[in-house]
Image (cartoon, rainbow, N blue to C red):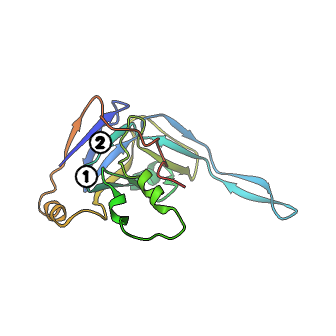
Amino acid sequence: MKIQYVLVNPMCRPEMHGNLFDLKSAENVTFEDPKLVNVVGDNEFEKRLMWDEKIVSLGIIMKLPKYLRADLQARSSTYTRHKLIMGNSRGIIDGDTKLSNMVKGIELGKNDFRNIIYKCDKGYNGQTDVLKIPLLAISATEIKIGDRIAQFELVLTMDAPWWFRLKWALKRKIIFEEVALLHTSNRNGFGSSGK
């Protein structure tokens, strides 16, 4: 199976180490120590710990095959080396699939959920859909361009038909193909599948 990709930063070519594909930081980022800040509570001030949080570019746009998605997570060394954790535990990178096919003929009541699904029926692979990772700093640290900070695993989507599941079970050869341009429409970047 082929994954086409565009490098936004030439230092961010994906690598396979172990069972997952590693992704790299596309930017130099400095994080500060968490701070205690005063916030207004119920008629009084209280102190809260505020983490330094940033969304870091991974410098790559990928077009995943139909019926596959990528589960993105921080590498274990992202914490041990940099004292950073991923803000949302894991991220989902949608492949080229049409989830709207799954709800045809289902009565969804007064909520117009169907429209939300139809808006999300293309993969996260447009020219502005650069992969990113939200990170929280446990202590002051920095990451450099090219640091391996994330990893992803390819996973079958819910609507993968039986023949594709069988193909995936028997042959999981992944070929990465770098291209200058993906001929796809934008989904409008990080966190774009709705509220």
Q: Amino acid at mark 1?
A: Lys
Return the mark for residue 14.
2
Task: Report the residue at 25% width, 52% height from top.
Answer: 66
How crowded pointer 1 is (Cα within 10 Å; few <14, some 14-19, many 20+) is rated as some
- Which residue type does callout 2 highlight? Pro
Name of the residue lying farthest toward the right: 43
Left or right of residue 185: residue 45: right
* Identity of the residue drawn at 34% across and 32% down: 11
Mark 2–mark 1 Cα distance, whole angstroms, equals: 20 Å
Location of residue 93 in the rendering, given as x and y in whole percent from the top left corner: 37, 51
- Looking at the image, is mark 2 or mark 1 earlier in the sequence? 2
Q: Secondary structure at mark 1?
A: loop
Judging by the rendered image, the residue that carries numbered circle 1 is 66
Residue placed most toward the observer, 182 or 151 = 182
Position of the C terminus, as image quadrant, is bottom right
In the rendered view, would you say 154 is above or below 180?
A: below
